[in-house]
Amino acid sequence: MGKRDLVRAALQMPTFHGLGVADDQRFDHIARTTQSAERAGFDSVFVMDHLYQLMFLGGATQPMLEGYMLLSALAARTERVNLGTLVTGVTYRNPAHLGKIVTTLDVISGGRAICGIGAAWYEEEHRAFGFDFPNTATRFEMLDEAITILTTMFRESSCDFTGRHFRTEGLVNVPAPVRVGGPPLLLGGSGERKTIPMAARRADAINFNCMVDEVPHKMEVLHRSLDAVGRDRDDINVTLLVSLVTAEGHAEVEDLLRNMVRGRGMDPAMLDDAGFRAGLTSRMLVGTWDEIAERLGTLMGQGIDGCSFMLPAHVSDATGPESVAEALRRAGLITRR
């Protein structure tokens, strides 16, 4: 399998609350959702690596589980899907410790770990948990050093590193990762000055977090960045993070979208305003199975390899991934039935 096939159809779980799911049933709900994705043919399942829920998804009062403990438990409930965070902030863990954690996930899962990492951004969360939150330039320096430590731990017999922010001395990582070459390194983000050029230099994959119509421009930036360092496009997997609202017929799609808006505490009638609808759906794929397959075909033609799909309209349904799989099959992103 080439790098461009690493992630084609991923499920990203941005929330852990589930409508009507009690705390003592929360993990079982998440596990059943993950198993549904695996049955449906998704190749990867990602969770966020945050300690607070994001502000626009309810904030600190909403449930949030620690990412790597959750992924290790999901590894025991699954057989085929890749597992990772989308993504881990470099400020949350010493990178050598993170390397050991991701290696352990790779061993537990039989070689299915993906190491998602980024420069971090959620300042409120950092303050609450007592983490330092340096300026942007410093966080990207930390990210660059962390990538060196992680890739060395995954691929070499020992790691000695001295940087401005991190150091290791005689570090050995035993047992080694199961996956040949170690867990792939995935950078999250779509910043044109720092993130995309860093991914072009150092990553196995990048997940864009941008509006759907920005993809052609982001791909141009990526191509220029790859050319600048002498790397081939086939050396990196490129995905787009999108919310997916789809069903077989138009009426059901509209119902799902309106229910999603209602679930966010807004009046569904606001969707009747064309400007509001366009803004809301700028980071979404909304349509029937055939319409989604066509839009995904367009995105693939613009150069991406796949998508990480969030299913906000299905948060209460542990079989949600199976309910949308037909659209992805028609687009050729899923082949399993």
Image (cartoon, helix red, strand yellow):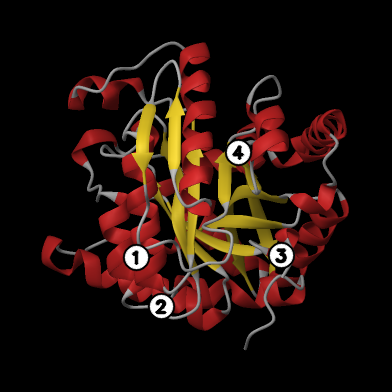
State the CA–CA distance, disc 1 to disc 2: 15 Å
Nearest to the eye among marks 4 and 1: give it: 4
State the CA–CA distance, disc 3 to disc 4: 19 Å
Q: Position of residue 240 (x, y in %)?
A: 66, 48
Taking the spot 69% from the left edge, 31% from the top edge, the residue there is 196
Q: Identify the residue under disc 3.
A: 5
Q: Identify the residue under disc 1.
A: 316
Name which residue type carries label 4.
Asn
Nearest to the eye among marks 1 and 2: give it: 2
Nearest to the eye among marks 3 and 2: give it: 3
Q: Which residue is most to the left?
A: 24
Nearest to the eye among marks 3 and 4: give it: 3
Picture quarter containing residue 293?
A: bottom right
Q: Position of residue 150 (x, y in %)?
A: 47, 42
Name above or below for residue 282 compared with residue 17. Answer: above
Residue 209, numbered label: 4
- The answer to the question of whether label 3 and label 4 lie on touching residues, with beta carbons closer than 8 A, is no
Count neighbours of disc 1 (C-alpha within 10 A) and say few if under 14, some if 14 to 19, many if 20 or more: some
Instruction: Give the quarter of the figure containing the C terminus.
Output: bottom right
Callout 4 secondary element: loop
Callout 3 secondary element: helix
Count neighbours of disc 2 (C-alpha within 10 A) and say few if under 14, some if 14 to 19, many if 20 or more: many
Q: Identify the residue under disc 2.
A: 35
Compare residues 89 and 40 and report the one nearer the observer.
89
Count neighbours of disc 3 (C-alpha within 10 A) and say few if under 14, some if 14 to 19, many if 20 or more: some
Name above or below for residue 112 compared with residue 298. Answer: below
Name which residue type carries label 1.
Ser
Sequence order check, earlier mark of 4 and 2: 2
